[in-house]
């Protein structure tokens, strides 16, 4: 073999396969697991797309698991990520409690866990690195304050709650109740879970109409999908959603803007699902040994019908 050939061989087998680009370091996590809640809403689909897209952009191998709304599936997924010795785990926890045992296992395996969008209740917060999320309590407050203003503090409200035991359902309820507390004319006359699903919102709204007839003035839905289902039920019952009944929900997905433009939804509070870029920046910073705050909060705002046509332009979800 000539000296030149020998050099080429060395280059091809030893040197070229390594990635020397400046953004890739020995500590950059390359194999990451993502235990997602499921696909219950448009918001969830947008979050999944953002995280998957960002992983692809950065050349991260993302092992994705759809928990189908069940905590036991998510726990199984986390255990399988441990068995595969992944570099990091992203968890969007369906409910707040019951995570301590599996997080002790991730800690024993030295795999850092990053929570996205929903918080958990654990006695030891060092079991996860950080939570990247919206302030759900504040979202509930924004919805409550808007409704107080629009109704002059007088409304019989029906509430469509999110998944029982989930952080957004608990916190959005709490924030809304806080905002209407000082207004005795604001009464929640019915409250039930529609599980963050369009079908759930429709079914629960049908039951509310059955029980109350027209004896309510406003709908507060913990997400847009349930509000959109409720709009279908109100329509079918001969009521005019957005006019006979005021409707406010949370998420600000594209379909909510379309409903506001059509006049059937009155307002929506944004909850930003585009977590991918910030999430992977955070995972990389942590791998480089930087200090990460325990909570990273996405700022949100409220949109009304008058903002909808302009705001929907160029919207990513
Ligand atoms: O955790 C965020 C919530 O979960 C979104 O508001 C809802 O649409 C989703 O399913």
Image: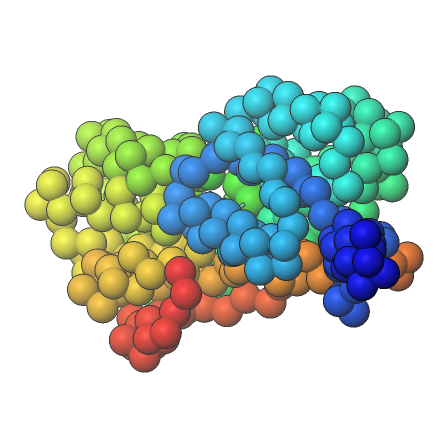
Residue at the front extreme of this rendering: 1
Above/below status of 1 relative to 95: below
Residue at the bottom extreme of this rendering: 310
Is residue 133 rendered to the left or right of residue 311? right
Q: Quadrant of the C terminus?
A: bottom left
Is residue 89 rendered to the left or right of residue 73? right
Please state which of residues 187 and 168 is positioned toward the viewer in this rendering: 168
Task: Locate residue 297, reporting x and y percent.
Answer: 67, 61
Query: Is residue 139 visible from the viewing direction of this image?
Result: no
Q: Residue 290's quadrant in the figure?
A: bottom right
Q: Residue at x 38, y 48 (%)?
A: 42
Is residue 85 rendered to the left or right of residue 117? right
Please state which of residues 75 and 300 is positioned toward the viewer in this rendering: 75
Q: Residue at x 43, y 47 (%)?
A: 45
Q: How is the image coloured?
A: rainbow
Residue at the left extreme of this rendering: 238
Query: Is residue 299 visible from the viewing direction of this image?
Result: yes
Task: Locate residue 299, reporting x and y percent.
Answer: 60, 67
Task: Locate residue 274, reporting x and y percent.
Answer: 53, 60
Above/below status of 1 relative to 167: below
Please state which of residues 117 and 96 is positioned toward the viewer in this rendering: 117
Q: Residue at x 77, y 31 (%)?
A: 85
Please state the total of marks drawn on the protein image: 0
Q: Residue at x 29, y 57 (%)?
A: 255
Is residue 256 rendered to the left or right of residue 25? left
């Amino acid at each position: 073999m000539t000296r030149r050939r020998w050099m080429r061989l060395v280059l091809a087998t030893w040197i070229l396969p390594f990635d020397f680009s400046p953004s890739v370091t020995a500590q950059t996590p390359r194999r990451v697991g993502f235990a997602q809640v499921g696909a219950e809403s448009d918001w969830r689909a947008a979050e999944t797309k953002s995280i998957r897209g960002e992983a692809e952009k950065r050349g991260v191998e993302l092992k994705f698991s759809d928990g189908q709304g069940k905590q036991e599936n998510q726990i199984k997924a986390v255990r399988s990520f441990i068995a595969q010795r992944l570099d990091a785990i992203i968890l969007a926890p369906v409910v707040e409690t019951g995570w301590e045992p599996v997080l002790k296992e991730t800690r024993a395996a030295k795999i850092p866990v990053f929570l996205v969008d929903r918080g958990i209740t654990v006695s030891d917060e060092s079991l996860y690195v950080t939570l990247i999320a919206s302030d759900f309590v504040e979202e509930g407050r924004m919805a409550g304050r808007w409704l107080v203003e629009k109704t002059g503090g007088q409304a019989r409200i029906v509430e469509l709650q999110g998944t029982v035991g989930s952080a957004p359902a608990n916190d959005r309820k709490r924030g809304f109740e806080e905002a209407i507390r000082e207004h005795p004319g604001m009464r929640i006359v019915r409250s039930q879970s529609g599980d963050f699903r369009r079908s759930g919102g429709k079914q629960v709204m049908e039951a509310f109409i059955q029980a109350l007839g027209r004896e309510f003035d406003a709908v507060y839905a913990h997400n847009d999908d349930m509000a959109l289902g409720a709009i279908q039920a109100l329509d079918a019952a001969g009521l005019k959603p957005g006019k006979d009944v005021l409707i406010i929900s949370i998420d600000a997905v594209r379909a909510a803007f379309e409903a506001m433009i059509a006049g059937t939804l009155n307002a929506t509070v944004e909850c930003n699902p585009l977590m991918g870029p910030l999430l992977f920046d955070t995972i990389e910073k942590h791998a480089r040994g930087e200090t990460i705050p325990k909570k990273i909060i996405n700022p949100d705002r409220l949109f009304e019908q008058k903002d909808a046509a302009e705001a929907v332009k160029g919207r990513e979800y």
